[in-house]
Amino acid sequence: MKVADMHCDTLAELWYTHWEGAVPSELIKNNLHIDLEKMQKGDYLLQNFAVFVNLDRKLDPLESALYQIDIFYQEMAKNSDIIRPVKAYADIEKNQKDGIISGVLSVEEGAVCKGRPEFLRILYQLGVRMMTLTWNHENELAYPNNVPTDASTVFPCGSETTMGLKEKGYLFIEEMERLGMVIDVSHLSDAGFYQILQNTKRPFAASHSNARSLCRHCRNLSDDMIQKLGNRGGVIGLNYCGSFLEEGADDQNCKSTVSRMAEHARHITNLGGMECLGLGSDFDGISHNLEMKDCSMLPLLEASLKKAGFLTSDIEKIFYRNVLNLYKEVWK
Ligand SMILES: [Zn+2]
């Protein structure tokens, strides 16, 4: 079964090995969740590679993004017999015909644009086709869903229902829609989600989030959000992180199973329709007890969905068709 995955943090992991002065890890083969050899085993068709910046590290966000974008293109050039970058939907179709995996650049932390639409447009020119407005920190554009809660509760962070987009956030979503860049609401506050819903026309994505009613984590989407995102034609990427799958799982004692993923998949598609779910692994951004230990093991998830009663045509939609349709619709 072909795979299109809307989110991984592999690019940032490769970048860290550059600035730690170690021997830089490479995309062809490494000890991460994702490398090209494992992707070939997993039958990958497309992978989004997120440029990820943690503002806590006090690095220049734009400069950090540019380093990662350079690594992305260096790796694409070195391995063009296996994977090639895409900027348009036709590029994906061509790669698919030629048996080549498609690499998509995305951004996880809108602060890389420093609040300047000029930098957003430059990143678009560099190939960025999807962006989260925030990660877990407030930035120039919006507020995240990351309200500290009482440590005694099972809900590890609270949802932010009043603080959403800032003035520049509104400007950015308008410009992203004009450019044909997918707006990604993963990490964004609940208030921001509804403001995006009200102020955009095109489908958007939650690239790596699950269902909050099965696991009360602020990174997951409420039933109402799932329904509204589905009605818009948007796609939610199923996240493999144990703490977004199973309630109460902490970082140490956190299990990620494919049977639990199938339960989230059933819930999300019951609410939002069979067209609203895709994959958003979060590979290389999660470090838990994973039943699918890396990207070569996607057949485990396929088998689990089958066992849960999903038809092969449904699994195709979840594994790649819905994501491809989203890109076809939003990209120019
Ligand atoms: Zn994330």
Image (cartoon, rainbow, N blue to C red):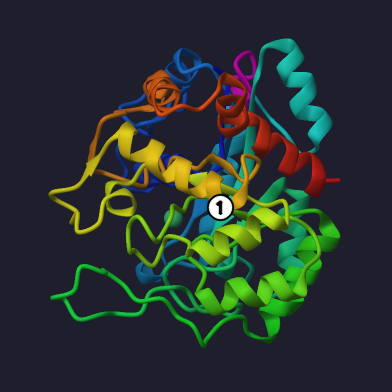
131 vs 302, nearest the viewer: 302
Circle 1: element type: helix
Q: Nearer the viewer, residue 296 or 73?
A: 296
Q: Position of residue 4 (x, y in %)?
A: 58, 31
What's the residue at 80%, 67% (across, down)? Answer: 175
Number of dots carrying numbers? 1
Asked whether, in this view, residue 66 is left or right of residue 15, the answer is: right
> From where the camera sits, is residue 311 visible?
yes
User: Which residue is painted at 26% across and 50% down in the image?
Assistant: 246
Numbered range of the magenta stretch: 76-83
The quadrant of the image that shows the N terminus is top right
Is the residue 154 above or below the residue 46 in the image? below
Residue 64 in percent (x, y) is at 51, 57
Q: What residue is shown with label 1?
A: 271
Q: Is residue 82 magenta?
A: yes
Camera-side residue of 80 and 300: 300
As displayed, is residue 321 above or below residue 126? above
Which residue is depicted at the point 78% across and 51% down?
125
The type of residue carrying mark 1 is Leu
Residue 78 placement: quadrant = top right
Does any atom of ligand 1 lie closer than 8 Å to the CB of label 1?
no
Above or below — where is 261 with respect to 234? above
